[in-house]
Amino acid sequence: MNGQASKFLFNVAPMGAVRTTQRQKWVDPSAKRYYAYKQAIAGSAASQASIGQPTPAALALKMVFVMPIPASWSKRKRWDALNKAHMTKPDLDNLIKGCTDALNGVVWQDDKQIVSVEATKVYGFEPRIELYVTEIS
């Protein structure tokens, strides 16, 4: 990264951070799914850009979480929901945490470098995470 925004696209259904003990990480099904989710994001980030070493710079993030529209909704309700605010669980702060934790040591050295975040969650037909990372001088 060189001061310009780097874009990352993760084609996964966004998932909020799961709070577990060290032991639960290996036995709890939701913890295992969360661990696999973080690995998928990290692997995808590493393959998307020639990012080289994780940056030590201060960072500003813009994040868009595109949440799946429930299949049980009518066709009309699904179309009406497209790109509208998603106001149910998971909470936005947990979505941010799950994504930023996954990118520690991949895009940045540690998520303590993140000094600004703009985040949104909306409904969409193709669940994904769009991430824009800008180094701040």
Image: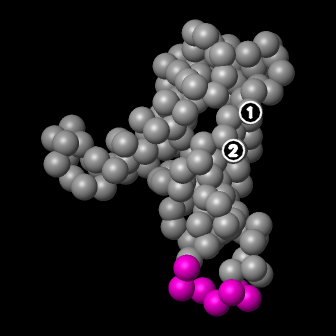
Q: Is residue 18 left or right of residue 83?
A: left
Residue 51 location (% of width, % of height): 64, 16
The residue where tag 1 is placed is 7
Q: Are marks 2 and 1 in contact (CB under 8 Å)?
A: yes
Q: Is residue 16 left or right of residue 122?
A: left
Which numbered circle lies on residue 77? Answer: none
Query: Mark 2 vs mark 1: which is more N-terminal?
Result: 1
- In the picture, the quarter occupied by the C terminus is top right
Q: Residue at x 72, y 68 (%)?
A: 85
Residue 76, magenta (yes or no): yes
Q: Amino acid at mark 2?
A: Glu
Q: Give the Cα separation between the discs numbered 2 and 1.
A: 7 Å
Answer few, some or many: residues within 10 Å of disc 2's Cα (few below 14, many 20 plus, some between 14 and 19): some
Badge 2 marks a residue whose secondary structure is strand
The residue where tag 2 is placed is 130
Badge 1 marks a residue whose secondary structure is strand
Query: Which quarter of the picture shows residue 107?
Result: top right
Above or below for 69 versus 28: below
Above or below for 14 versus 108: below
Q: Residue at x 46, y 38 (%)?
A: 40
Query: Which quarter of the picture shows residue 70?
Result: bottom right
Q: Residue at x 19, y 42 (%)?
A: 26
Above or below for 66 versus 132: below
Q: Amino acid at mark 1?
A: Lys
Residue 24 location (% of width, % of height): 19, 46
Q: Is residue 112 visible?
A: no
Q: Which residues are magenta?
A: 71-77
Residue 34 location (% of width, % of height): 37, 47
Q: Residue at x 51, y 67 (%)?
A: 89
Residue 112, magenta (yes or no): no
Answer few, some or many: residues within 10 Å of disc 1's Cα (few below 14, many 20 plus, some between 14 and 19): some
Indicate the colouring scheme: one colour
